[in-house]
Image (cartoon, rainbow, N blue to C red):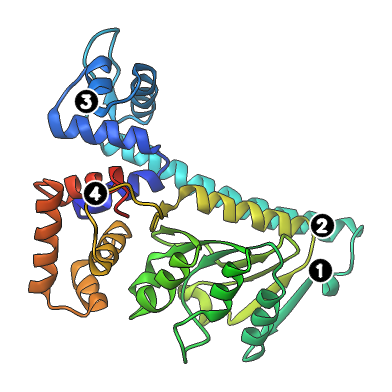
Amino acid sequence: MTSTDLIGQLRVLGLSTLATRVYSQLLDTGAATEAELAATLSIDAAEARDAAAQLVEAGLLRPAPADTAFTPVPPETGLDILTSRAQSALHEARVVTLNAYDAYRRSGLGPSGDDLIEVVSGPAMLQRIKQMAKGAQRSVRRLDSPPYYANNTLSNPREIAQLKAGIEYRVVYARASLERENYLEGNVLPCIEAGEQARVLPEVPVKLTLVDDVMAAVSFTLGEADVHAVTLFVHPSSLLTALSGLFELAWRAGLDLHRDGSSSERRLTATERRLLALLAAGVNDDAIARELGVSRRTFFRHMEKLMVSAGAANRFQLALHAANNNWL
């Protein structure tokens, strides 16, 4: 894993942005007291104390008595703890979803199973998804992952039109989505520029679209789609509520793919912004160069220019500068 991956992965594993900044500062400059951290990072002493306490609780810092320095410790144990928590949370969300449906099915209080869930396969899946999305009135939430069934185009004019009409979109993209050729430039970034709120995770548990809290379409991600090429359309029920909770859990864990209203004095080019977004998502160098349509040599020239602008000695410091200055 590259140093650029670290900041994003720690947030995915549950650390707050402030805790990540504190941890990065300690790795960069060595042990520091609560007061020194507050002064260096321009935060309140209470914020520094809370962030350090989170890192201590996660096993990444050694506990420090009053007025003594916090010191990073070997991270293996702490990372195991954070990873286990994240895996447990996602597993629990899936179990809750399954249990909610089983309880509803056994209760016999609601509509029949045929009314609760539609099972659609083959070419009809795409048409049914389009119909559902077209009917959105307030919001659309989506966990986005391959495979994609509309292979003839990468653009998404319907979403852009709905965003202009005031419909809210929140999307969590799997890393595999951004590695699809031209998908970031042709689909994702135009939607973000139109107002979509976007985050990214290394992977998402299912493909999911929720429309207005009244219907969901759920199907399998790339690894399972060849075996289970079906989409389930879920109507209002405990299962729909559980799917909504699953999305919100993934949303909280995701890393911002892009923020509007940058406060940075450095005006980034479109290529630089795409490069930083892909780096933050953990995409490898070759895939980034291919997505940007440049050679590896040109890619590294872009990287060098960004690092000079940020005053960064390595990718980790570049990631910190990009996060702190709203470059992403």
2 or 1: mark nearer the eye: 1
Kind of residue at badge 1:
Leu
Label placed on residue 218: none
The residue under the point 24% across, 60% down is: 268
Residue on which the image places disc 3: 40
- Give whichever of discs 4 and 1 has the lower sequence position: 1
Do callouts 2 and 1 mark residues in contact (Cβ within 8 Å)? yes
3 or 4: mark nearer the eye: 4
| Circle 3 SS class | helix
Question: Count the marks: how many?
Answer: 4
Q: Position of residue 79 (x, y in %)?
A: 32, 40
Quadrant where the N terminus lies? bottom left
The reply to whether residue 257 is in sight is yes
User: In whole angstroms, how far apart are the C-alphas of marks 3 and 2?
Assistant: 54 Å
The residue under the point 40% across, 22% down is: 50
User: In whole angstroms, how far apart are the C-alphas of marks 4 and 2?
Assistant: 54 Å
Farthest residue toward the top? Answer: 66
User: In whole angstroms, how far apart are the C-alphas of marks 4 and 1?
Assistant: 52 Å
| Circle 4 SS class | loop
Residue on which the image places disc 1: 116
Q: Residues within 10 Å of mark 3 (few under 14, many from 20)?
A: few
Q: Position of residue 267 (x, y in %)?
A: 24, 57
Return the residue nearer the eye: 252 or 219.
252
The reply to whether residue 74 is in sight is no
Label placed on residue 265: 4
Residue on which the image places disc 2: 104
| Circle 1 SS class | helix
Do callouts 4 and 1 mark residues in contact (Cβ within 8 Å)? no
Kind of residue at badge 4:
Glu
Q: Is residue 20 above or below residue 259?
A: above
Return the residue nearer the eye: 165 or 27.
165
